[in-house]
Image (cartoon, rainbow, N blue to C red):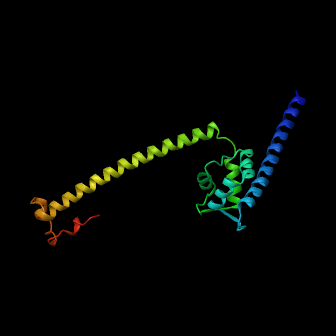
Amino acid sequence: VECAMQTTQKNRDLLVEEKRTLEREHLKHMRQIFREIDIDRSGTVEYDELKEQLNDNRHLQDYFKALALNATDTLTLFELLDQDDSGSLTLDEFCDGAMRLKGEARAFDINFLIQRERKTSSILKKLGRSMQSNHDNVDKLKDAIAELCTRGWPNSARAAAAPPPPRLSPVCPLLSPL
């Protein structure tokens, strides 16, 4: 039994090391790809550089396929890689993003996104209802202010005890557009 456990542990260790080695190799390849794409050697990759290289460089297209990176929609790929929305990719952005995007989507990832979208949609619906309610209340308040501006304060015992309202100009300043 102990021998079997040691063999299992050794197999786990080998799998972990193999995965780490594979990831290091992928990262090395991604750095090489970045240098190929960076035509002007600026240290950053612009969208046009990526598009040109992915359209014209068959070797690069095959390389992306071998790494299981979907590069068929260049603009979407660029936007997914450009984490800081700067319009250009640094070496780190490119490598980190490529490592994150390589391979097929897993069921876990897809279900996570579906769940996140449902929650976001629910929050947006609640926000929309709240905004509509607030808008309705503002309209009611504007109508009440307009009535006060045109008719004056109501005649009630409370109003009689209160100091007189301030004189309003012919155009009520409270009715100005929000």
> Could you tell me which quadrant the N terminus lies in?
top right
- In-image side of 18 versus 114 (left or right): right
At x 62%, y 55%, the residue is: 78
Identify the residue at image location x=61%, y=41%: 109
Can residue 139 be seen in the rendering of this structure? Answer: yes
Q: Is residue 152 visible?
A: no
Q: Look at 10% across and 59% down and name the residue there.
A: 157
Q: Residue at x 61, y 49 (%)?
A: 73
121 versus 55 height, above or below? above
Q: How many callouts does the rendering have?
A: 0
Q: State left or right for residue 127 relative to residue 99.
A: left
What x and y, as percent, mark residue 77?
Answer: 62, 52
Q: Quick one: quadrant of the C terminus?
A: bottom left
Q: Which one is nearer the viewer's eye here, 8 or 27?
A: 27
**In this view, 149 is above or below 105:** below
Is the residue 172 above or below the residue 135 in the image? Answer: below
Give how far across and how far down residue 141 sits, in percent. Answer: 23, 57
Q: Residue 34: x and y, percent?
A: 73, 58
88 displayed left or right of 24: left
* Closer to the camera in the image, 145 or 59: 59
Quadrant in which residue 166 is drawn = bottom left
As drawn, 54 above or below 109: below
Residue situated in front as seen by the camera: 133 or 87? 87
Q: Residue furthest front?
A: 56
In the image, residue 68 lies at what x, y percent? Answer: 71, 44
Residue placed furthest toward the top: 1
